[in-house]
Amino acid sequence: MPAWELIREVLVKGRADGLDDVQLAGGIYTVLVSHGLIQGGRA
């Protein structure tokens, strides 16, 4: 799945759950790391 689709899914689900921007950013970061699209570590 392309990275943009993963990001979109996280945004849709996060907004539906009422998450704020910081929580959404954390969710996007976690998904990208878990799929190996970016390297983990402290940002």
Image (spheres, rainbow, N blue to C red):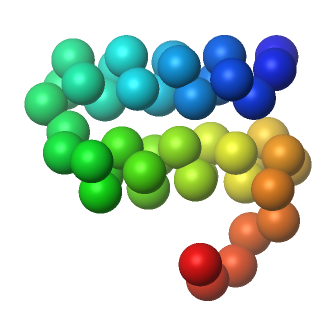
Quarter-of-image position of residue 39: bottom right
The residue at the far bottom in this view is 42
**x 31%, y 29%: residue:** 14
Q: Where does residue 11 sit, x and y in percent of width and height? A: 40, 26
To which quarter of the image does residue 6 belong? Answer: top right
Q: Quadrant of the C terminus?
A: bottom right
Q: Is residue 17 left or right of residue 40?
A: left
* Left or right: where 23 falls relative to 27: left
Vertical order, 27 against 12 (above or below): below
Q: Residue at the location (82% across, 16% down)?
A: 1
Q: Position of residue 9 (x, y in %)?
A: 51, 18
At 29% across and 57% down in the image, what residue appears? 22
Determine whether 5 is above or below 23 in the image: above
Residue at the outermost left position = 18
At a point 20% along the width and 39% down the height, the residue shown is 19
Q: How many marks?
A: 0
Q: How far across and down, in percent of the image, does residue 18 sit? A: 13, 30
The picture places residue 24, in percent across and down from the top left corner, at 36, 44
